[in-house]
Image (cartoon, rainbow, N blue to C red):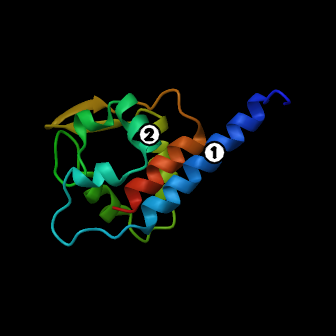
Amino acid sequence: MPKRTPTLRHLLTTALLAAGALLAGCQTAPSSPMDEKAVARAPIEIQRMARKNDCFKCHAVGREKDGPSWQQVAEKYRDKPDAQGKLYTHLTTAPLIELKGDPEIHKQVEDLSKTEIDALIDWILTL
């Protein structure tokens, strides 16, 4: 059996992440305010990425914590053609945000490829 190259492994990971994002987008959202059950419907890789980068420290799916809920983020960017790009920039540039009235630098995601960040953003936008 030939040895797998890192390129093939990367392609397989990318395909799995894309398939997971598509599956997440096919699910219907509950009519009541979203709760943490929506996290359970996220593909395992997306949950892992969000936990690894401490996203759940300040954000929840259906309720505000220190940051807006991901449902609020999805609503803000719904039907905006530049949503993916703006959220990608937000997650990768450590912008200045306001937290409880005080300025703070938003944590920049680490150790994720563009494809992985896009999959996370795609899932958030389906909420």
Q: Residues within 10 Å of mark 2 (few under 14, many from 20)?
A: some
Residue for badge 2: 91
Q: Quadrant of residue 51?
A: top left
Q: Is residue 100 above or below residue 26?
A: above
- Position in image of residue 15 (x %, y %): 64, 49
Residue furthest front as drawn: 1
Q: Is residue 26 above or below residue 19?
A: below
- Position in image of residue 65 (x %, y %): 16, 42
Q: Is residue 78 left or right of residue 81?
A: left
Residue for badge 1: 14
> What distance separates the C-alpha of mark 1 from that of mark 2?
19 Å
Quadrant in the picture for the N terminus: top right
Residue at position x 38%, y 54% in the image: 124
In this orientation, which residue lies closer to the viewer: 12 or 125? 12
In this orientation, which residue lies closer to the viewer: 110 or 85? 110
Quadrant in the picture for the C terminus: bottom left
In this orientation, which residue lies closer to the viewer: 89 or 44? 44
Mark 1: which secondary structure? helix
Q: Is residue 17 left or right of residue 122?
A: right
Query: Mark 1 belongs to which amino acid?
Result: Thr
Residue at position x 52%, y 61% in the image: 22
- Position in image of residue 98 (x %, y %): 23, 38
